[in-house]
Each structure stands twice: as C-alpha cells, then as structure tokens.
Amino acid sequence: MSRTATAVPPQGTPLRRHGRTKIRYRTRGLAWAFMAPLLIVNLLVIGGPGLASFFYSFTDWDGLGSANFVGIANYVELFTSPAVLSAIQHNLIWTGFFLVVPMSMALLGAFLLSRVRRGQILFRVLFFIPYVLATIVSSIIWRQILSPTAGIGQALQGIGIDWFADTNFLGDPALALGSVAFINNWQWWGFLLVLFLAAMQGVDPALYEAARLDGANAFREFWHITLPGIRPTLMFLMLMTVIWSFLVFDYVFILTQGGPAGSTDVIGTVLYRTAFSENRAGYASSMAMLLTVISAAIVLGYQLLRKKLKWEV
Amino acid sequence: MSKISRRVLRSAVVAVAASSLLAGCAGAASSAETVTYWAAFNSKDTQKTFQAEFIDAFNESSDDAQVKLDVKQWSNIGSLTDTAVAAGRGADVVFSPGPSSALGFASSDRIDSLDSFAKEYEWEKVLEPWAYQASLVDGELYSIPTGYGSIVMFYNPAVFAEHGWTVPTTAAEFEKVATEAAAAGMIPVGAGNSGYQAQSEWYLSAVLNAAVGPQKLYEVLTGTAKFTDPEFVDAMTTLKSQIDKGWWGGSANSYFTNTDTDMFTGLANGKVALYMTGTWSFSSAGSYFGEAAGNDADWNWAPLPALSDNVEPGVYPLAIGTSLSINTVSKNKPAAAKFLDSLINDPAKIYNYMAETNENPAPVVVEESDFPASLDERIARLYKDIPKSSNLGYASWTFFPAATDTYLYTEFDKIITGDMSPSDYLAGLQKTFDGELAAGKVIVPFAPTAG
C-alpha cells in the first residue's frame, strides 16, 4: 500500500501539470473547433448586420443610396418622437401583461394539471395546439371571432345577450392593444403551461409527501415546494418574456398594423414602417439599436440579480 | 477502399467536375442572352396569360434575347427588389410600384437612364404624355410604366334604382345620396383600413383630388402651394364631419375593422351605397357580383363626383402601379430594353391582355380600334375616357414621396379618432413633404391640363 503510494509521483508535479494543461488546451481547442462553424455563421448573420445597423443609425440612409453621417440626430428624434415614445409605452404595457396573465394562467394550469392522473396527456395536447397554429391562421380566426359585424358580439346578440353587440375590439383605440394581447396570449399560455408542467414533474415527490404529513394545504405546497422547485424554468421564461415583449411584431402587424391611430403601435411596427414605407433605414436602425440596448440591459440585469441572489440559473 | 472503387471514385469526381465546368460555361453563355424579370400577379390565370402573351411570345420572336420570368408575391416583391437592388444584385428588369419608387432607385444609381433606348424605340410617342412626364428624373427617362389606373366610384345600379338615386356628380348630389343612404341604414360611402392600413390613401386621394382639385395639388407637388392652405383645411374638415356622421365606413370604430372585401360585399347586398377605390378592382369585382357570388347583383362605376363647388366634376386621379427599369448591374441592357419595348409597343395586344385578365394596361397611346370587342364595356369606357379628359389628378401613392404618403395614411387615423385636428394633420403633412421636396425625392408631376 505504502509502496504503491510512494511509487506514484505526487499530485501536481511539473510533468503532470504540463500533461494536464496540454489535455485542457486540446479539449478547449476541440470545443472551439466544434463551435467555430456556428460562431462564424453568427458573426456573419448577426454580428455583421448588427455592426452595419450601428453604423447606419448615425446616417440618413434611405436603404438604397449613399449614407450621409448625421451624428446623433436619429437618436434625438428617437427620444422626442411621440410615435416612438407611445410605442415604448405599449411595449411596457405588453410586457406587464405577459409577465402577469399568461404566467399566472400557465402556473395555475400546470399545478392543477400536475395533480391530474388520468387524461393529462389529452389536456397537454389541447393546451398546446394553439401554439403550433401559424400566427396568420390564429390571427384570421380571431379577427373573425371579434368582428363587430359577424363575430361573437353578433352571435351572442342572436341569443339575446347584448354584452358585446356594440363592442369593436380591434377598431376601438381603447380596446385594441388589449385585444391583440389577448389573442397572442391565447396562443402563448399553453406553451408556458407545458414547460411549467415538465419542470414540476422534476420536483422531488418526497417533498410533497413530507409537506402533506406536516399538514400543508395545496396553496402552501405550491408556494413552498413547487415554485422554488421550478425557479430555474420560471426565471428563464420571465426573462424571455420580457425580451420577446420588446420584440413583438407579428400579431400586431397582422391584426392592426399598429392602428387604430397608433393605439397598438409597438417599436417593431414603427421600425418596420419607418424602414420600408418611409424609406428611412438610418432612422429605423437607431430604433433597432434601442431594442438591442433594452434586451442587453434586461439580460445584464438578470445576470447581476442571479449572481447577487446566488440563483442556479 | 479497393483499387477499383478508388478508380471509380476518381472517375466520378472528374466527371462531376467536368460536367460542372460545362454547366458553368453553358450558364455563362445563356446568361449573356437571358434577361431576368421579377413580377407578381393577381392570380395564376393572369400569370399564365402573361407568360403566354408576353414572355413566350417575346422569346419565340427574339433570337438574341430570352426573358426568364421569376414570379414573386405582391406582398413582398417590393421589399425583395429593394433588398436585392440595394445589394447590387436583382433582376435585369427592376420592378417599382410606381415612378416615386423608381426615383429612389435612380437617385442612388441603381437603375440606368433609358434615354438612349427611348430614342431608339420612340417611347415618348408610345406612352401617354402624362405617364412619360411622370417617369422622368431630372429630365431623363428612368422607368417605363406598364400598369395604370385611376380612382373611381363603384356603385350597384339596382340599389340606386331602388332608392331613386342618380349617380352623383356634384358635392350637393353626393351629399343628397349620402344623407338618404344613411337614413336608410346603409353605409353611404364604403371605407375601412383593416388588414391594409394604406387603404386610407385611396379615399384620401379621392378626397384631395375631388375636393381640392388637381390644380392645387399640382401647385403643392411643385412647391408653390402648401397642404396647410385653406382649401386643404376645408376639405379635411368636411371629411372629418362626414366621418363623424358615419358616412365613411359607417362609424369611426368600424372604419378600422372594415375591409375592402366587406365594402364590395356591401355594394352587392345593398348595405353600401358608394365605394371610391382603384380600378385595379375591375379584376376582382366580378367575384362579388352575379353568378360567381351567388347573387343577381351587378356593379358599375362613375368618375368621382366633385366634393366641393370649386372642382370640376369627374376628376381621374391617375396612378401608375408598376414601373419597370433596367438594373445598373445588368449585363444585358439592350436585351432588357427590347423586352420593355415589347410590353408597350402594341396597344392592341395590351388591351387584348386586359380583356382576358381585367388587369390595368400600360399607359400607351391607344386608338379606339385597338379595343377588342371582348373587353368589358365598363372597363373600356374608363380607358377611352381618360385620354380624352383634361381633368386628370394625382394618386398619392404615385406622385407623393414615400414618407409623405406614409404620413398621409397613418396619421389620418388620428383625424378619425379625433386625436388630431385637420389643421395639425396638414401641418405635419407639409413638414414631411418639405423635407422630401428639399431632398429631391418628389417626382415632377404632369401639369393638370395635360391629357
């Protein structure tokens, strides 16, 4: 035993360290070699256009001709434009809505569904179906449902319920943003539910049993076991919800194109209109930069919070 | 790996390399003779007819140039072309949705002057003077218009007969029909922008031409008058009061959920009295009326009524929907020009194509004898009237620069909702236009008496 022990060179000798370093370098090299194609693609399709956008955001480029340097004029216009400020406000409302409504619905739905033993798969499929529908399809379906002349309002009126007879969900500036968010949520929350449900199934059942033995009710189980148990998933989805809420475009564009009277305009629709209808690609680039900064700030804030609170993700 | 398989592999590699080389040579040889052209169509039938009558016919008659048609969708042909041309690529024949867009390409040297070809093919004699003028940039021809139309007033003759109305030509007659239609529970004037926000520019172009008049619009477009002048403020104030009365689209809220389809369906079933829209609808109107739609309704059209006492009734705001140019990077410019010429040099062929598809024709000088007997009389009437008319106006999407036109239809929403006054709206419109006029982004319009 002792001979064997003395025969083995002590840990950390220069020779051993050199060998390990070599292996580490080789392993790293291999990792970089595997990542290289993806990194190159990323640099080309994200880094290149990103840098170009940054450059164009200081110019009056119309998307075709030469780009003249205009300093920070685009950024001055950006932060004083009522259309952009209103769009940012709508993005914030959208973010708040999606952090609260679909998250709550999905958490509650997943928690209840996690207790269902029979038919769980059926419900999972049913809740997930809207997510696999093409955005254009679900938008058109909902536009018909909310149509003031042929939609749910008229159908209900036909059976004597006048609640929505005069309600124009997508045509009333006071209702349009909420209506679009509602439609997007219809598609979105089922996806969240499936993710939360998968995360909940990873929580140790023994914890629930112990809690029940201690007399905990369903709410306490949810609050003290489920939520901490799925925190990595929850935090990740909240982070992505905030980022996606600032990048939202498709539902708004298909359903209202930012109207009526800009009441559903978000940065994405204003940016699109500025670049492709007004031919002001330089100014639109400054909006793209704003979106990038917002997303970066959110990710940075999350990382700082994660370190400070010592979260696992 | 055995020796045989290595030999086989080596032979295969050599064969592939050789065939690639040959294919490359063949491609290079054929590309020297091939003119590429991106186009979009309203239907498969229209595409087939165009292919047969313009592409195949050209290719059969031409020894030195062959056209290759690449079909795109209307929804993205503009952005695809912009992106490709901006990158120094794209088709030999460059599509623009009108001369204002072609001006953008010309200003950035993405398309070539067509002056030398214009002389060779005598395009100034072939095209209507107003269309030739609208296609000039700094006095040089940069695009060839291949589709034009106007904004007219559609109506259902049976509904008019039922209510005892005559087609309005003056502001007073228009108001009478609108008042009675509203009293009858109808939408007096079809309007809405659901699904396509830019639809508002159709109605605004109608109103600006019919209430302010082509002369005043010409002065604004040439920088000698302003959108803030009283004529425009009066026109927009009147329009706002009519919207508030529910004349345009039924109500402010329903305006934002009405579609073009809703309005034509309304015309057919008697729920909409009048609809002012573009003549591109000639190609689709049939689907809402008669046997195809399962009803016995029919449609007709009339020129726009005057919407103020200062404007002559029957103005035709002119619109060019498609302009074609030659890409600066094209290696086959003479062949591309030859193809462009083939699209406009035979009026009888153009109108025969229109008879088959109901698509808008190129604005070429045409004799009445060129109209085929099979052409729908209602469509023929428009294209016989316009060349004789001296009351020609300006559709915003053809004659307004991009940002001004975008402002026109996006900010108009705020007039409807009451969030902006007509004078503030027009002040913003003028400010946007001033910037584009100073930047040289406005095409020089034809004088309103031309025609």
Image (tube, coloured by chain):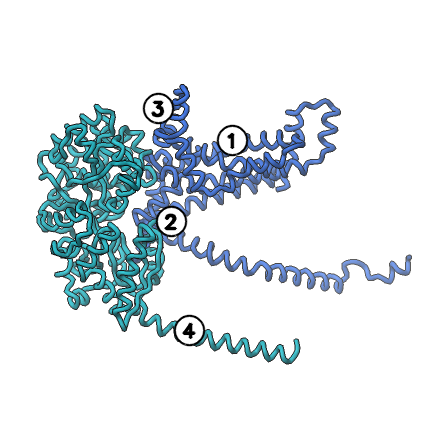
Chain colours: A blue, B cyan
Q: Could you say where residue A273 lies in the image, as x and y percent from the top left?
A: 34, 44
The 10 Å Cα crowd at callout 1, few under 14, some 14 to 19, many 20 or more, is few
Label annotation for residue A205: none
Chain letter for mark 2, please.
A
In the displayed structure, would residue B348 be above or below residue B272?
A: below
Mark closest to the chain's N terminus, 1 or 3: 1
Residue highlighted by disc 1: A100
Q: Residue furthest top?
A: A160
Co-location on one chain, circles 1 and 3: yes
Label annotation for residue A166: 3
In the displayed structure, would residue B12 be above or below residue A150?
A: below
Q: Nearer the viewer, mark 2 or mark 1?
A: 1
Q: Nearer the viewer, mark 4 or mark 1?
A: 4
In the displayed structure, would residue A150 be above or below residue B445?
A: above
Question: Residue at the location (57% across, 38% down)?
Answer: A125
Q: Is residue B103 visible?
A: no
> Which of the 4 image quarters holds residue B242?
top left
Q: Could you say where residue B13 lies in the image, as x and y percent from the top left?
A: 54, 76
Chain letter for mark 4, please.
B
The 10 Å Cα crowd at callout 3, few under 14, some 14 to 19, many 20 or more, is few
Question: Residue at the location (39% across, 22% down)?
Answer: A157
> Which of the 4 image quarters holds residue A33?
bottom right
Residue highlighted by disc 4: B24
